[in-house]
Image: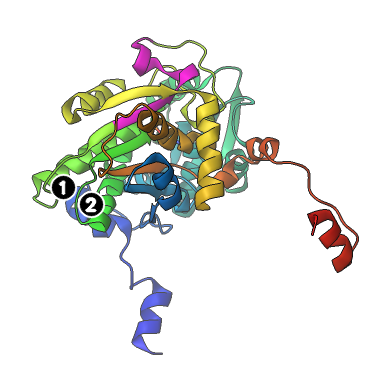
């Protein structure tokens, strides 16, 4: 076989994510190699949306292209590898959906039992099915995410057999999620000026900030971005500076009233000279539609909070025209077919002739 073909078919042409950034990760020779092909996600220029906003350098980091369709895989691959190294036999997590899909997949690949605890009736259909099909045992509770997190923390502490909590309170999750910041610097050849990101449990904004700091400290990026976090208006504890007992938003991945990484996120905002503000569900859905229709990027609604925030700041004249701005699109649009379905019209229906199809198209 020709060596180039061998390289591409065995994956040797592209290193594993955690090998590529090994120097910045808690990986040792004793850490088992585990990978579903996470990371290396596209950075896409948003030319049409950027032009409409008067922004010359607007980009999206398309994290929905990770193996299970969200950025959660970056942290999960490290957390599950370290759990294996430590001799764990089972994984447990609470989830608004994507953490469970990711834990279930990496748990399956590692041969571990996986238990997920979810708020009943609040998980997008695609995410729930991913967890179930990959073999996790799913427990739905009559409560919200914050309560589910309390439950799994207690179970992980009191369990009689080795069970690893893989929520973002697991420090290895945030370590792995730093890799997205490294990729951005490598792809742009510099750090962005602004990183715009949805904020739920606030782990991801904290991880990006740590990642930019690592790269800057190692001399691999000359500057640091300002961190702009966006919460949904009905689930904005950091913006309002108080816990929200009953968070509500269409953006289910960020429907969180008591973020686990609250303090870290506030530190990222302060240290970077950034901000954490809120956007309404209507603004989120408008941004979500713009990404799909103007740029061909179908993300999940929660992801669009990043662009919704940038659109708001641009309208308020609070952005520099030439700044390099990256919006993180955290998950794939295929996760949440119900919200998508509600936003489209009826199908056009026609008899199977060219004339009939032309007729319904109004040609
Ligand atoms: C988990 C998640 C978020 C929120 O990230 P945090 O680290 O909890 O702030 C945003 N969008 C999607 C799609 C997610 O899965």
> Residue 179 location in percent, x, y?
28, 48
Q: Residue 215 — which label? A: 1
Instruction: Give the distance between the C-alpha atoms of the residues marked 1 and 2, in whole angstroms.
Output: 8 Å
> Residue 148 location in percent, x, y?
50, 22
Residue 245's place in the image compared with 19, above or below, is: above
Q: Quadrant of residue 202?
A: top left
Residue 10's place in the image compared with 290, above or below, is: below
Is residue 52 within the magenta segment? no
Residue at screen point 62% across, 47% down: 133
Q: Is residue 111 visible?
A: no
Residue at screen point 42% across, 20% down: 154
Q: Residue furthest bottom?
A: 1
* Disc 1: CA contacts within 10 A as few (<14), some (14-19) or many (>=20): many
Is residue 233 within the magenta segment? yes
**Side (left or right) of 268 relative to 330:** left
Label 1 SS: helix
The residue segment tinted magenta is 228-242
Among numbered discs 1 and 2, the one appearing first in the sequence: 2
| Colour convention of the picture | rainbow
Q: Is mark 2 within 8 Å of ligand 1?
A: no
Q: Residue 185 — which label? A: 2
**Side (left or right) of 101 relative to 124:** left
Q: Is residue 20 visible?
A: yes
Residue at screen point 36% across, 35% down: 197
Label 2 SS: helix
Q: How many marks?
A: 2
Residue at screen point 59% across, 34% down: 138
Residue 22's place in the image compared with 129, above or below, is: below
The N terminus: image quadrant: bottom left
Mark 1–mark 2 CB contact (< 8 Å): yes
Depth check: give the residue in front, 333 or 160. 333
For the residues carrying marks 1 and 2, which lies nearer the camera in this image?
2
């Amino acid at each position: 076989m020709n060596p180039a073909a061998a390289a591409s078919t065995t994956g040797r042409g592209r290193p594993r994510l955690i090998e590529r950034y090994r120097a910045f990760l808690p990986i040792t020779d004793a850490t088992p190699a585990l990978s579903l092909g996470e990371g290396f996600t596209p950075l896409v220029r948003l030319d049409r949306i950027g032009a409409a906003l008067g922004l010359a350098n607007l980009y999206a980091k398309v994290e929905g292209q990770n193996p299970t369709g969200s950025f959660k895989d970056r942290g999960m691959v490290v957390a599950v590898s370290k759990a294996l190294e430590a001799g764990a036999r089972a994984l447990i997590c609470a989830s608004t959906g994507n953490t469970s899909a990711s834990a279930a997949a990496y748990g399956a690949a590692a041969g571990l039992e996986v238990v997920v605890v979810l708020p009943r009736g609040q998980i997008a259909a695609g995410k729930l099915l991913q967890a179930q099909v990959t073999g996790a045992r799913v427990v739905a509770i009559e409560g919200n995410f914050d309560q589910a997190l309390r439950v799994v923390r207690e179970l992980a502490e009191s369990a009689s057999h080795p069970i690893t909590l893989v929520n973002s309170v697991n420090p290895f999750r945030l370590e792995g999620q730093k890799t997205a910041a490294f990729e951005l610097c490598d792809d742009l050849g510099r750090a962005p000026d602004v990183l715009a990101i949805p904020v739920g449990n606030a782990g991801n904004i904290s991880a990006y900030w740590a990642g930019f700091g690592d790269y800057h400290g190692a001399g691999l990026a000359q500057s640091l971005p300002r961190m702009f976090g966006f919460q949904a208006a009905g689930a904005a504890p950091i913006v309002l500076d108080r816990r929200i007992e009953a968070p509500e938003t269409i953006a289910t991945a960020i429907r969180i009233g008591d973020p686990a990484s609250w303090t870290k996120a506030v530190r990222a905002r302060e240290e970077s000279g950034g901000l954490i503000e809120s956007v309404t569900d209507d603004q989120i859905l408008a941004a979500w539609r713009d990404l799909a229709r103007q740029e061909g990027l179908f993300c999940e609604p929660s992801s669009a909070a990043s662009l919704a925030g940038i659109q708001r700041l641009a309208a308020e004249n609070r952005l520099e025209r030439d700044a390099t701005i990256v919006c993180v699109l955290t998950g794939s649009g295929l996760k949440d077919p119900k919200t998508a379905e509600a936003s489209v019209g009826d199908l056009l229906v026609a008899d199977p002739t060219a004339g009939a199809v032309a007729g319904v198209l109004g040609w």
